[in-house]
Image (cartoon, rainbow, N blue to C red):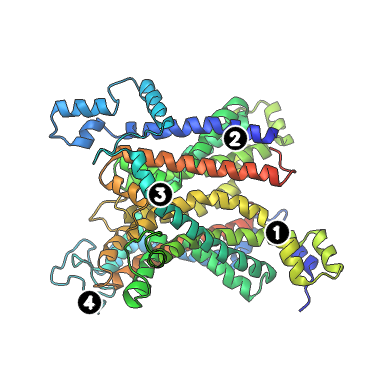
Amino acid sequence: MSIRLGEQASESAAVPEESEGVGRRGLLARFLRHRAGVAGAIIVLLLVLVALTAPLFAPYNPDYQDLNAILHAPSHAHVLGTDDLGRDELSRLMFGSRVSLEAAALSVFIAILIGIPLGFIAGYYRGFWDEWIIMRVVDALQAFPFLILALALTVFLGPGLVNASIAIGIGFSPGFVRITRAQVLAVSNQEYVDGARAIGAGDLRIFRSYILPNALAPILVLTALSMAAAVLAEAALSFLGLGVQPPTPSWGQMLSVAQNYITLAPWLAYWPGIAIFLAVIGFNIFGDGIRDTLDPRMQL
Amino acid sequence: MTFVIRRFLVTIPVLVLVTVMTFSLIHLIPGDPATVILGQEATPGAKAALRHQLGLDRPAPIQYVSWVWGVAHGDLGNSLTDRTPVSTEIIQRLPVTVELAIGAFLVAIFLAIPLGILSALNRGRFLDYIAMLFAFGGMSIPPFWLAIMFILFFAVRLHWFPASGYVPLLQNPRANLAAMAMPMVATGIREAAVLMRLLRSSLLETLSQDYIRTARSKGIRRWAVILKHAVRNALIPVVTASGLTIAGLLGGIVITETVFSLPGFGRLIVEAVYQRDFVTVQGAVLVSALFVIAVNLVVDVSYAFLDPRIKL
């Protein structure tokens, strides 16, 4: 087998056919051709649908304890079996999607709320605040192993869905600071920003009208990828008992119950894990699809 | 040399901020820490004594200085549950975690390098899809679920490995490796996926360089070019990133040590969290952050010596 290394690689560096001046419709069409990205979008959509319609379609009340049906194997009555308190596993799984999505959305929202303003200040005003305060805080936050930081924050703040989301959100904020700062640095030297300043536009208007629209693409991608990581982090905190508190069903907590009955009721261990896996991979490949659509050379 | 000096200087504010943040954790406790730790029923005298022991009866800046002074002398305070020094407890737990981390890192490297090379060489073809599937799967699979599945299949069903139970390495290397094999793989898979994707894109870029074509046209055999010329250079960013994956690895270890009940550093944190032993949590958080800072410093500085082009 002969190889043509040069040729192979030039293919990799090739820019997609219509890279400049694609309208919104062109972007959508390009995204729809990205098979993995579309698969991710479908998974995310289904997940949202399940979360919204759980009260309509769940076969049982997720908190209802049927003490005559403890640790029952999957059957016609309980398609995925029942847990240690006789609760229907499928219903809990469906309701668990709500906690997962709520926590992930809230944590990413918090990360954005912290990250974008700080990133803008760092990149726009530069100098002392940027070099010695904001970016060093970012460095310091990133020195803590993420899960250990989240664990510590939730134990000091107290467990629960909101506190877990705050902990995860703080952990994710450095990513948003860095990406916003990098975009601001890249854009604020452009002539149109100078022009805007010359006609008397204020800092806030420059940010809103010129910098934010240009920074949106990487922020969007980071948001999707952060959703994936947040679902995983929330599940990990719930697994350790620090997320949403019982009896509210969450996937991580269901897995920690399953681990205790691994020999008696192995069926409990499959589905919560598969649900987390699907949610995470859905957001991951969705984010990847958006990136390839908007800018294949983006480093993220 | 200026790079090395600069790199050290930048570390100083980061160190200060990391200690300030870790120190501030105890002030995040809603309400009075002494009441939270001892419970509502505790006598005012007991609360005052604990506040004094934790230094909470002094102004915050003085608390911070005396805490940092202690930390600099290896004193992380005493555990709230059994009064042993936190530093002693951490040192006792370290061997397990170090072994697990090294094992997981080796698993990551041994999976990532061959898969990354195969996937880059077969770009867009079947093998590449399989490798990318592994990469996305590995990055998305919850590590605690993977650990539970390992226990279910390899311990409960097949009886290949023990489900839990740790044996020190020096006491019985065979039993130790049997107990550590599943945790190592469960922790390493995620890093393997991250490093594999990185190596793939880095190798694709390297393969497009002129010197690769030159080497090929000189008549050097394909695999010699790939391994000696391309992979070596493509590994540079991967090595940098593997320094950064240390933080992720430590987080993963917390989970796997919990699932497999290994008496390591991660398990120490989780136990302290369950017992609301804030002093131990604080100490462990600080140690993990200092470790990450040290590793990144070593990686960056050794780079400056290995690659003379690097300047900050």
User: What residue does disc 3 label?
Assistant: B94
Pick the front one: A17 or B251:
B251
> In which quadrant of the rendered view does residue B272 lie?
top left
Mark 2 vs 4: CB contact within 8 A: no
Q: Name the mark on residue A207.
A: 2
* Kind of residue at badge 3: Leu
Q: Chain of mark 1?
A: B
Q: Are the numbered discs 1 and 4 placed on the same chain, yes or no?
A: no
Task: Work out whether residue B236 can be spotted.
Answer: yes
Q: Tell me, yes or no, whether dots 3 and 1 are on the same chain.
A: yes
Q: Nearer the viewer, mark 2 or mark 4?
A: 4
Give the mark toward the camera: 3 or 1.
3
Please name the residue shown 63% across and 37% down the image.
Answer: A184
Q: Residue at x 28, y 58 (%)?
A: A249
Mark 1–mark 4 Cα distance, whole angstroms, equals 59 Å
Q: Which residue is mark 1?
A: B232
Of labels 3 and 2, the one closer to you: 3
- The reply, left or right, for residue B219 in relation to residue A11 is right
Quarter of the image with the C terminus of chain B is: top right
Q: What separation in Å lies between label 1 and label 2 (alpha carbons)?
A: 43 Å
